[in-house]
Amino acid sequence: MAPKQQHGRQYDVVVFGASGYTGKYTAEHIATHLPTDLKWAVAGRSHSKLEQVVAHCRSLNADRPPPAIEVCDIDDGQLDALARKTFVLITTVGPYGQLGEHAFRACAENGTHYLDVTGEVPFVARMLAKYENAAKASGAMMFPQIGIESAPPDLLTWSLAALVRSDPAFESARGAVRDVTVSVHTFKSAPSGGTLTTALNLLENFSISEVRAGQKPYALSPIPHPSPSSAPTPSLLTRVTGLITVPTLGLLTSSIAAGTDRALVHRTWGLLETIPSRRGQAYGPRFSFREYLRPRGWYQGIGLHLGLILFSVVLAVPFLRRLIAGYVYGPGEGPDAEVAKLDKLEYRGVAHADSPADAGGDGKGQPVAFGRVWFNGSFYHLTGIFLAEAAATLLEDNVQLGGGGIFTPACLGQPYIDRLDRAGFHSETKVLSE
């Protein structure tokens, strides 16, 4: 176990929103897996609900001192005080577009490292515009989108790029990656109330122009892409049906998370190009990223593609949003824990090196980097793992990011990936030939 960072604050970690559905899973993982000398607290609005969380944590690990309780409302003054008490603040209080700015601002301005699980790209774009300079000035290292959206594809892309840099098969590329395609290969789960509320209320919290702006390629990147036209262009058939066949990955279709995940991966690309200590991990100047979903067959693939179009229409109509909201889990609720244990998640991906050897060719016979990440168990347990292990990485490892700022999961690098592997989120990469 590595020594903790010396920070002089009351707590190492505080979980804000610990009595919510995702917050409980996060507290569970901290109680059962992080060092027993950790100084931590659970925070939220209800003292009685937090007492229940503390009692549950004590039952899971009687050898660990239980977390302290911090009663804190969604209020600038109270969150300022809470942020000043802790080295890392984990917040699972959403929808972030409605409720998340208070905690984000408090951490950025008070030099507190920050982790959240938003999937709202417009929220991240808004926070970048308002608080990135404050985070850099205070030294706060901030990691939004470090849950199911969008840590798995971001970390898989980082691992594929690492293989291209290190394996002799890609020597002629000198570490540069031309493109990464990721497939949601297995996704067996039901969403929590918080996730559904976020999706249904996206246009309540952001304008259509903000949503569109956040979905543009490299919109969150700190630098523009030098050759955006280098990204593969989907065919007319793919645009109409959603279907595409990718060598090694097979038949794929549109993914509901493609835009969200692409925005984060593109930000990682830009950060690795600009952080001096990380330029040796840069993906390369012509890098592009695509994400799809693996259907059972082409009928289902077309159906899923058309279903996403219909869902977009529903989100744009307030009456339909309110109608659907009456039939889904509410905030703080989610699938039964025993049922959620049967969840399964797997992403697969391929990366092509930006090599002169296949410039202008079809790539056949050239080496390709293949990778996958997977987890068996509740997706919200996995989100708790992402958060807790990121906090441990910040506490115990030298992440070498050159100071404060707004980063991505992949910026935590191999130490974070190794921690996740020990916690059950596994990954592997290898070289194949197409």
Image (tube, grey):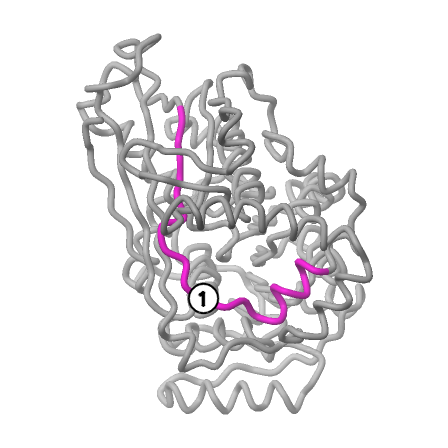
Q: In this view, does 107 lie above or below 227?
A: below
Q: Say which of 343 and 267 sits in front.
A: 343
Q: Does the magenta stretch include residue 196?
A: yes
Secondary structure under tag 1 reads loop
Q: In this view, does 246 lie above or below 171?
A: below
- Read off the magenta span: 179-200
Q: Where is mark 1, residue-wise?
A: 189
Kind of residue indicated by mark 1: Ser
Q: Where's residue 160, x and y in %?
A: 32, 36
Q: Where's residue 102, x and y in %?
A: 75, 60
Quadrant location of the C terminus?
top left
Q: Say which of 118 and 403 sits in front.
A: 118
Task: Using the rendered view, name the quadrant where residue 292 is placed.
Answer: top left
Q: Is residue 398 visible?
A: no
5 sits to left or right of 164: right
Quadrant location of the N terminus?
bottom left
Q: Say which of 359 and 124 sits in front.
A: 359
Q: Is residue 53 above or below residue 44?
A: below
Q: Where's residue 293, x and y in %?
A: 43, 46
Q: Is residue 169 magenta?
A: no
Q: Is residue 411 above or below residue 176?
A: below
196 sits to left or right of 156: right
Task: Using the rendered view, name the quadrant where residue 368 is placed.
Answer: top left
Q: Exactly how many numbered labels are in the figure?
A: 1
